[in-house]
Image (cartoon, grey):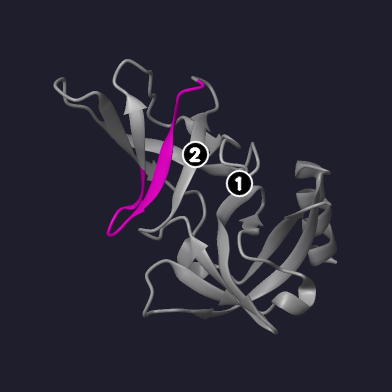
Amino acid sequence: MNELRAITKQLQFDLAFDVIPARVIMYDRTKVGELVINKGSESDLKIGDIAIIDNFALGEIIETEVGNSRIRLLTSPESVVPVIGINSSTKGLVKGELGIGMLLTEVLIENELQQGELLITSGLNNKYPYGLNIGRIGSITSVESELTKTARVESLVEFNNLEKLFIIKQRQ
């Protein structure tokens, strides 16, 4: 019953997507920021499908086979996601960063950043749909001689404790 409620909540996010529940079966300790789920090509999962939980983006499928798929989490150093500030509309890129988690980059120095502001996916790369939660802006770093500034991104999801998640698939 809890799973049905969770699916219903996910469907309210955006009716342009099908939602497939999945369970985490392994955290890959050899690859930073990756995990394996119990659904794969038999569930029509494909590379590039997005993993979410409670309207929070988690990452994207980077490998799939019968019975399982590998997901690259947002905290992976290989992850880059276009985002926008929910209040300021400031755009940037969230990148996974070793030892930090996530870092907001490519923000023009003149653009406003507010500590605590919620960042959502901007939908600009056609991979992550618009409006998925990413996290909140933490400490901000700017140098006057630089054209851009950066900020730590505080995740509202515990990536190391995921058990269940959902994969969103664009409807054809």
Of all residues, the one furthest to the bottom in this rendering is 67
For disc 1, the marked residue is: 128
Q: Is 65 rendered above or below residue 53?
A: below
Q: Residue at x 60, y 49 (%)?
A: 56
Task: Using the image as rendered, state which of residue 172 and residue 74 is in the foreground.
Answer: 172
- Magenta-drawn stretch, dominant element (helix, strand or loop): strand
Q: Secondary structure at mark 1?
A: loop
Residue 142 among magenta residues: no
Q: CA distance from mark 1 to mark 2?
A: 8 Å
- Determine whether, in the image, residue 56 is placed left or right of residue 150: right
Q: Residues within 10 Å of mark 2 (few under 14, many from 20)?
A: many
Q: Is 127 rendered above or below residue 124?
A: below
- Determine whether, in the image, residue 171 is placed left or right of residue 91: right
Residue 134: x %, y % from top left? 52, 44
Of all residues, the one furthest to the left in this rendering is 145
Residue 74: x %, y % from top left? 47, 55
Q: Secondary structure at mark 2?
A: strand
For disc 2, the marked residue is: 82
Q: What number is the disc on residue 110?
A: none
Specify the amino acid type for callout 1. Answer: Tyr
Which segment did they paint magenta?
Answer: 89-103
Residue 99 among magenta residues: yes
Q: Is 8 rendered above or below residue 133?
A: below
Residue 55: x %, y % from top left? 66, 47
Specify the amino acid type for callout 2. Answer: Pro
Residue 42: x %, y % from top left? 77, 79
Decide: marks 1, 2 in contact (CB < 8 A)?
yes
